[in-house]
Image (cartoon, helix red, strand yellow):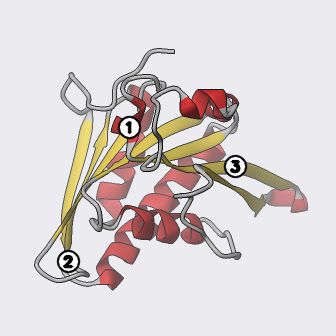
Amino acid sequence: MTGNQTPQASPKASLKQYCRQEAETAKLAKGFAASLERFITQNPDAHLNISLEGDLGAGKTTFARYLIQSMGYEGKVKSPTYTLCEPYSINKTKQHNQIEFFTVHHFDLYRMHDPLEWQEAGFVEHFDVPGFCLIEWPEKAEGTLPAFDIQIQLSAGVNEYERSITINALSEQSRTVVEDTQATQ
């Protein structure tokens, strides 16, 4: 597989927001979740790869938790630091009471010792199913991951709740997600 953790091309769309409180981070994640959900509803077979980048303590897992819960997941959203991957099935009732679901695979590669470890664990199959993959610490995979559609960069602020969050669309299909999120903020 080929792919880059850091995009070489300029983003197709970009949103930058400074969050002074955790509630503002939650609001941004909720707006992003709604945009992702609209995209997935309109493109039920689509799959997006989303990188979560930032230093230790920048809020990557917190953002992921708010995102997954905003999409309707009611259980506990755990950090996949030790398991490398936590899957979450998101069920949505559509018209005529049809239940539709998609899967979010939340990866945390921080504890990986070898760039190919995620492939050897069989996680490569998760990158083709409808839904999306959230990948924390993608640089640990050293270019072995598929290309990213969206890059989320988080930087910690002065206190533990402050952070700067930038969401970049790296593919044409993800541009609508970022633009839609921008319009709702």
How far apart in space, not on screen, are marks 2 and 3 (Cα)? Answer: 30 Å
Mark found first going from the N terminus, 2 or 3: 3
14 up-or-down from 1: above or below: below
Amino acid carrying label 1: it is Lys
Q: Position of residue 3 (x, y in %)?
A: 40, 21
Amino acid carrying label 2: it is Glu
Task: Determine which quarter of the picture holds residue 60.
Answer: bottom left
Left or right: 47 in relation to 171: right
Category of crowding for the residue at label 1, using alpha-carbon neighbours closer than 10 angstroms: few (below 14), some (14–19), many (at least 20)? many
Helix, strand or loop at label 1? It is helix
Mark found first going from the N terminus, 2 or 1: 1
Left or right: 122 in relation to 17: right
62 up-or-down from 141: above or below: below
Which residue lies at the image location 42% right of the left edge and 25% below the top edge? 147
Amino acid carrying label 3: it is Thr
Q: Position of residue 165 (x, y in %)?
A: 24, 60
Q: Which residue is mark 2?
A: 162
Relative to the observer, which residue lies in front, 106 or 119?
119
Task: Determine which quarter of the picture holds residue 144.
Answer: top left
What is the quadrant of the C terminus in the image?
Answer: bottom left
Res. 20 in view: yes
How far apart in space, not on screen, are marks 2 and 1 (Cα)? Answer: 25 Å
Q: Which residue is mark 1?
A: 140
Q: Which residue is mark 3?
A: 103
How far apart in space, not on screen, are marks 1 and 3 (Cα)? Answer: 23 Å
Tell me if label 2 and label 3 are in contact, CB under 8 Å: no
Tell me if label 2 and label 1 are in contact, CB under 8 Å: no
